[in-house]
């Protein structure tokens, strides 16, 4: 069956079984490899993407449920030359150790920051509760998310200044 999925602002025609998890389409068909296969059961968060502004576990989300919805992967946030605030903050704060969980952490944090650029540590911990990190960089991850919120607020203020 052929479905059209909107991923990172572009339409992609996908020929796959409608029950296929989004993660497999992203990685195997579209070569978008930031979302990682961790557990395949929706329990580790390494496959997290954003769908219509909400963090979603792509390993357990069938593509049929995504037709007509906006999907964003880490590749859709920024580039090497122009990283998104969340990407910049994770680099500045050196929040990655092995890096396997980081794309999922960043996407879940991005979904949070799109709603609240000034989250408390409790807000951040709640948002990340489904994402596991075995390396123990939790304190740097918290700091990076707080920093990303600051960068997002600063960018929004600069846009207001230019428009006003």
Image (spheres, rainbow, N blue to C red):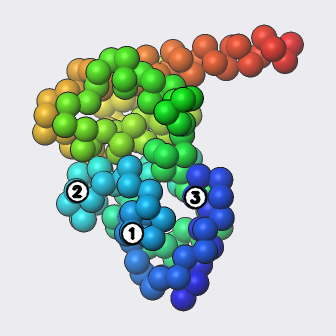
Q: Answer above or below: position of 15 versus 128.
A: below
Q: Answer above or below: position of 44 versus 59.
A: above
Asked whether residue 73 appears in the rendered view, the answer is yes
Q: Quadrant of the C terminus?
A: top right
Q: Residue furthest right?
A: 164
Q: Determine crowd level at label 2: few under 14, some 14-19, many 20+ residues with C-alpha closer than 10 A.
A: some
Cα gap from disc 3 to disc 1, whole angstroms: 14 Å
Q: Which residue lies at the image location 53% right of the left edge and 17% below the top edge? A: 151
Q: Is residue 30 left or right of residue 103?
A: right
Q: Nearer the viewer, residue 98 or 66?
A: 98
**Marks 2,1: beta carbons within 8 A:** no
Q: Which residue is under mark 1?
A: 28
Residue 50 in percent (x, y) is at 49, 50
Q: Which residue lies at the image location 20% right of the left edge and 27% below the top edge? A: 137
Say what secondary structure mark 3 lies in: strand
Residue 69 in percent (x, y) is at 61, 62
Cα gap from disc 3 to disc 2, whole angstroms: 21 Å
Of the image marks 3 and 2, the number of the one nearer the N terminus: 3
Q: Which residue is under mark 3?
A: 7
Q: Which residue lies at the image location 44% right of the left edge and 30% below the top edge? A: 87
Of the image marks 3 and 1, the number of the one nearer the N terminus: 3
Q: Which residue is under mark 2?
A: 38
Residue 51 in percent (x, y) is at 53, 55
Kindly indicate the quadrant of the structure image that contains residue 98. Answer: top left
Query: How many marks on residues?
Result: 3
Say what secondary structure mark 1 lies in: helix
Say what secondary structure mark 2 lies in: loop
């Amino acid at each position: 069956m052929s479905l059209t999925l909107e991923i990172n602002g572009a339409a992609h025609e996908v020929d796959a079984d409608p029950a296929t998890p989004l993660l497999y389409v992203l990685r195997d068909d579209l070569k978008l490899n930031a979302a990682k296969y961790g557990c395949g059961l929706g329990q580790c968060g390494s496959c997290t993407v954003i769908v219509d502004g909400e963090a979603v576990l792509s390993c357990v989300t069938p593509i049929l449920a995504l037709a007509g919805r906006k999907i964003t992967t880490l590749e859709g946030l920024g580039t090497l030359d122009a990283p998104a605030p969340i990407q910049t903050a994770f680099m500045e704060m050196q929040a990655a150790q092995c890096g396997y969980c980081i794309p999922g952490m960043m996407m879940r944090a991005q979904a949070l920051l799109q709603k609240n650029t000034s989250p408390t540590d409790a807000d951040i911990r709640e948002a990340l509760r489904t994402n596991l990190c075995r390396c123990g960089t939790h304190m740097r991850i918290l700091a990076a998310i707080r920093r990303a919120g600051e960068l997002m607020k600063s960018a929004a203020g600069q846009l207001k200044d230019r428009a006003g």
